[in-house]
Amino acid sequence: MSAGRDARPLVVAAAQMGPIALSETRAQCVARLLEMLREAAAAGCRLVVFPELCLTTFFPRWWIEDEAELDAFFETEMPGKETRVLFEEAARLGVGFYLGYAELAVEDGEKRRYNTSILVDPTGRIVGRYRKVHLPGHADHRPARAFQHLEKKYFRPGNLGFPVWRSMDANLGMCICNDRRWPETYRVMALRSVEMVLLGYNTPNDHTGHAEIDDLSNFHNQLAMQAGAYQNATWVVGTAKCGTEEGSHLIGQSMIVAPSGEVAAMATTLEDEVVRARCDLDLARIYRETYFNFAAHREPGQYGPITAQKGAVGPTGQG
Ligand code: CDT
């Protein structure tokens, strides 16, 4: 998947994680991340994408009332004392990375929680921060469910928009898990000339209460990322945390998708696994100069409801 002799390659890895047990410490998680970082660097990767909330188990599956218990899943600083080694090793290896974690921030004198990712460049410097915009699940207690999905209780919607950063000679954007299902996520970044969208996810296939949806979890995972990549002329690197985690089953299928919509590489296990691809960033340009030449073909004057409305309204025309 190359645009030809002018190819502008970025070798990237999706560093998938198998399950993280509740008892697993930050240091143990970071040790797993370090091992994959080194494997990716040895395979020539310049950028490694780790999963969403990859320093702890996926705690939003549980109703937690005790504030100290909840706080224990959050980072108050980044890098912190357990994560600093990851930054140092990445800088030593000359590899950038995306890392998803639970962020506890103090804003306007108030404690606020976000589902966050950072982009770290090959010198170990944080160049970008993203806070998950689309929070799935519910905020109320649903004890009848084997697993709840309490992102709406534990996190605020992200307040940083969808920035695109110039780093590693590429236009890089970030989103997190459920964001990948929403076309607006990719389109806002595409309007900022993104060439590669980095994202981590934790996707249970036993959470919706509808078998007909859960059974299609893998298909929808591929569909969302392939459509997002193609319709927005961008590479997409999606990295799962997967396998059976505290009894909940999380899908894998970490993948690297080209601007053509083709899957360039995909994980084959539900364990820690490094998936690598050599991505020609010029492919994004080629699709943007043809089918998806936005300046030539978009008609934003017709798209008003996209930003004016939140929910759907009834039909506006007469039959
Ligand atoms: N982490 C995350 O956003 N997961 C959701 C599953 C929600 S099931 C209620 C996802 O879209 O994959």
Image (cartoon, helix red, strand yellow):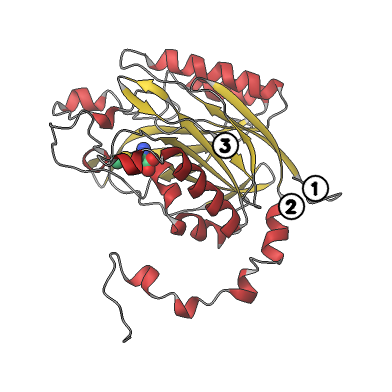
Position above or below: 187 against 131: below
Ligand 1 has an atom within 8 Å of the beta carbon of the residue at disc 2: no
Measured from the top left, where is residue 267 in percent x and y?
Answer: 57, 29
Q: Earlier in the sequence, mark 2 or mark 3?
A: 3
Quadrant of the image where one finds ligand 1: top left
Q: Give the residue drawn at x 77%, y 47%.
A: 2
Q: Is residue 213 found left or right of 150 in the rendered image?
A: right
Amino acid bearing label 3:
Met
The quadrant the C terminus occupies is: bottom left
Q: Is residue 224 found left or right of 56 in the rendered image?
A: right
Are discs 1 and 2 less than 8 Å apart at CB? yes
Q: Secondary structure at mark 3?
A: strand
Q: 30 or 124, which is in the foreground?
A: 30
Amino acid bearing label 2:
Asp
Residue 115 seen in this snapshot: no
Measured from the top left, where is residue 186 in percent x and y?
Answer: 50, 55
